[in-house]
Image (cartoon, helix red, strand yellow):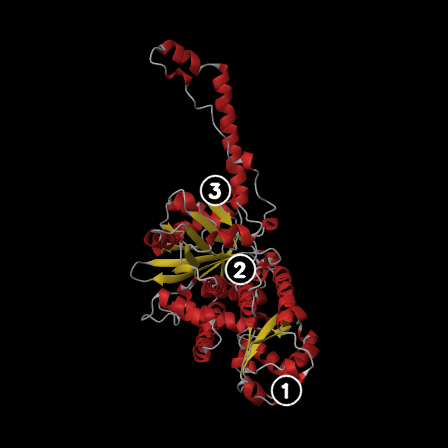
Amino acid sequence: MFIKDLRKGFYDEILHQRVLVLVAFDVDALCACKILQYLFQCDQILYTIVPVTGKEELEKAYVENSEGVKHVIFINCGASVDVVETLQPEESVRFYICDSHRPVDVHNVFNAVQVKLLMKEEEFDELPEYDSLFRDDDSDDDSGNDSDSSERSGKRKRFDDEAIEKRRDKRIWNENRQKILFEYNQFSTYGTAASLIMFELAWKMSKDTNDLVWLAVVGVTDQYIHFKTPRDKYIDDAMALESHVARHNHRGDDEDNIISINCLKIVFDEELQLTLYRHWSLFDSICHSVNLACKFKVWTLKGQKRLHEFLAEMGMPLSQCKQKFSSMESTLRHNIKQMIQDHMTKYGLTNQDVVIPSFSAQYGYKNKLCASDYVLACVATLENIDKNKSATDNFLSALDILQRVNVASLEKAVELAKKQTQAIVTQVQTFLDMHQVISAGPFLYAFIQEGTMDVKFFSKPQCLMRLARFTLEAHCSVSRNKRARSLPLVLGAPLDGEQGTTLVIGIPPLQLDDERKNFFGKAFEQAAVSTNSRTLHDSFDSYIMEMKTEDRSKFFDALISLLN
């Protein structure tokens, strides 16, 4: 059931109660969790936070932590499974689901007692009617169960026209229900960021602060950076946040309003779409940014030459480009955006390739970070490949980074993000040099070889997602096949050598970028069932799955025939 008033229907219900919070492993969920933590601390609500990576962990975490808990909150997890059926709670337990994954399981939507959805109801315009999915069946009531009813009367009942008609109606209704459910569950998409929903709750309760605005900004940016929401949806959310940023960062001209340099200051502006450029050299940043790297084809000699020409035409000496951005001459540093925009048209770049409306935060003289840098730093920490750290350790480290006082750990995380980005670009170059992106007819596919350098980075879903997208854009930029932009990509990476498993992800074609609808979740399930492939669909994102490497060829044969 959807909750229209978050304060009355959700927050007032959990006041003075003990709460269990289950949080998924993504930056948006982290930010929403952090906002909720702040609200709980304001009202002295007792809470337990448990990070969960998939559906199995969700069940395990609930079983281990549910004793004495009557209120359970799911952040970016739980919407796609029937939580009451899966977790078998007592009748007094209430579930609150704040999840951006779509579609939401229909049982969660229509459960009016135990399940409360903290989502925007207006986003659910394709929701099936209740009567087309559920009905009270009295046709199964067998009135012929009397002990003295004879066998003959039983036979007569079986061939009774009315009973046959009822059975036929039920069969048609069931077939129709299956069709409606298939159409409803066919595509994976994303709704409004969980962090934005939680921020709006804080705002309605007059408990919003500048720090909470920044958390919402980071959560919304995470959705855009990991290709979950289209550009238009991201810009709508950014504009909604811009009014809050203006409200919290408005300073008058009089002397009483002078703000301490250590306070957080958020600025809304058009941000260059260059990966981590404030912490890198300009040249490296361009070579590691999806849009510009693919436009210039920087992995070829010709592409490198064009990039050098572009920088020369801008009046940007190579000695300046290749040193750390913060060490560049201040005139070049401050005018870099304008210089790129003045010369981009000649090189086939559009404004959309170069800039995006975004936010940057500053506290102190030195620590200026844009929202996308923050997201990449958090993801690199969440998906840290250090064997000495558990998933929970990484989760807590990423939560720490969201506290702006931890500047040292943030700087370490930025360095980790650089390594992750370098690994992605190196792998893309390998794919292209070795011609490993292969067309299978209805889709493209590529597999990372076992033993490849930095392969451990790609055993993590969000890093694999960014690699898949970079690979698809790079392939389309060099491919002579005119259909390339209309083909989706399936990418596999070694997950566990000892167990012989592969992590597989499917992403939609570039020409459908305005919708960001992913159909691979259902396709993977059907291909696995039809071939008895050993797969594990444990992720909250249905288009990511694990499979036994041995079953790869038969699985792909089935996927090709299914999508043809």
Q: Which residue is mark 2?
A: 198
**Closest to the observer, 152 or 394:** 394
Q: Which residue extends farthest left?
A: 498
**Closest to the observer, 298 or 390:** 390
First of labels 2, 3 by sequence position: 3
Question: Which residue type carries mark 3?
Answer: Val
Q: Residue at x 56, y 90 (%)?
A: 319
Picture layout, residue 137 above or below residue 143: below
Question: Which residue type carries mark 1?
Answer: Leu
How many other residues sit within 10 Å of disc 3, few (<14), some (14-19) or many (≥20)? few
Instruction: Name the spot of residue 75 as percent of width and height, x first.
Output: 47, 57
Mark 2 residue element: helix
Instruction: Name the spot of residue 201 as percent of width and height, x first.
Output: 55, 59
Q: Which residue is mark 1?
A: 332
First of labels 1, 2 by sequence position: 2
Instruction: Name the spot of residue 266 as percent of width and height, x first.
Output: 59, 74
Q: As drawn, is 511 to the left or to the right of 167?
A: right
**Closest to the observer, 269 or 291:** 269
Q: Which residue is mark 3?
A: 113
First of labels 3, 1 by sequence position: 3
